[in-house]
Image (cartoon, helix red, strand yellow):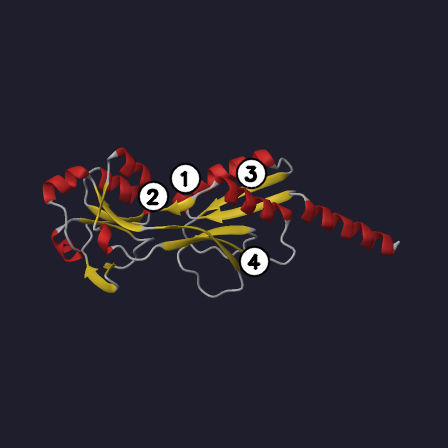
Amino acid sequence: RILADVEEADGSAQAERARPTGRLVVSAPVMFGRLHVSPLMCNYLESYPEVVGELVLSDRMVNLVEEGVDLAVRIGHLADSSLVARKVGDTRRVLVASPGYLDRRGKPKNPLELSRHVTIQFSAITPSVDWHFVRDGQEMKVTVAPRYVTNSADAAIGHAERGGGLTRALSYQIAEAVKAGRLKIVLADFEPPRLPIHFVYPTSRLLSAKVRAFIGLAATLCDWRFS
């Protein structure tokens, strides 16, 4: 009877690894999750009806093991850890303002001119008032005095669209506003290197079918190279 129970349990485990079933918990930054991971999750649940999906949106660094997260999206360079990482894209760090603001105040030609401009700080991307730029391999640091500080990308970008000043954002966050003409990118020649976008998960050993299927679907459907 014991051997039969062991064989049955092993068979169930193999079935779990063979087809996506159970609960899949995915974590992502708030705005990236809303714009890009949520549509992916919808497609995933349509393709795999035996899976129950949970999407957790948070800009803090989630502990995957302690919080029961199967897979997380991380933007930026990763610290050393026991997590497995798979690069799935990259994004630029850009400086933007509305056409109306630039008409009134002028377009800065180099970062040193930012001291004469109104700035908006999205603290999750740039927590310090020292904004870093790069030109010809040399790093430049400029200290700004933001008139508006927020931990919400939507709030910072929305204020910039209304003519409130210059703000730093990630290129995926402002892509639609730039395409529509509500924002313009400035100082593109001084942008720092792009930030990688990764999937991270606790281990690649015996990776469950539900996680493998999610990664595979993302590779098929998503182009997360935000140039």
- Earlier-in-chain disc, 1 versus 2: 1
Mark 4 neighbour class, 10 Å CA radius: few under 14, some 14 to 19, many 20 or more: some
Q: Nearer the viewer, residue 75 or 91?
A: 91
Q: Position of residue 142 (x, y in %)?
A: 19, 60
**Badge 3, how many Cα within 10 Å: few under 14, some, many 20+?**
some
Instruction: Tell me the SS state at disc 4.
Output: loop
Is the C-beta separation of discs 3 and 2 under 8 Å?
no
The Cα atoms of the two marked residues, 3 and 4, are separated by 21 Å
The residue sitting at 49% across, 39% down in the picture is 221
Measuring from the top left, give residue 55's x and y in whole percent.
Answer: 51, 43
Residue tagged by mark 1?
35
**Residue at horizontal 32%, vertical 46%?**
171
Sequence order check: which comes first, mark 3 or mark 4?
3
How far apart are the two marked residues, 1 and 2, measured between alpha carbons?
9 Å
Q: Is residue 46 above or below residue 219?
A: above
Q: Residues within 10 Å of mark 1 (few under 14, many from 20)?
A: few
Instruction: Kindly report which numbered mark, 3 or 4, lies closer to the viewer in this rendering.
Output: 3
The three-letter amino acid code for the residue at tag 4 is Pro
In the image, what residue type sits under mark 3? Tyr
141 relative to 80 in the view: left or right: left
The part of the image, by quadrant, that contains residue 173 is top left
Amino acid type at circle 1 is Leu
Kindly check if marks 1 and 4 are in contact, taking CB atoms under 8 A apart as contact: no
Which of the two residues, 121 or 113, is positioned nearer the viewer here? 113
What residue is disc 3 on?
A: 44
Marks 3 and 2, the one that precedes in the sequence: 3
Residue wearing tag 2: 173
Give the residue pinned by disc 4.
202
> Marks 4 and 3: in contact by CB < 8 Å?
no
Say which label, 3 or 1, has the lower sequence index: 1
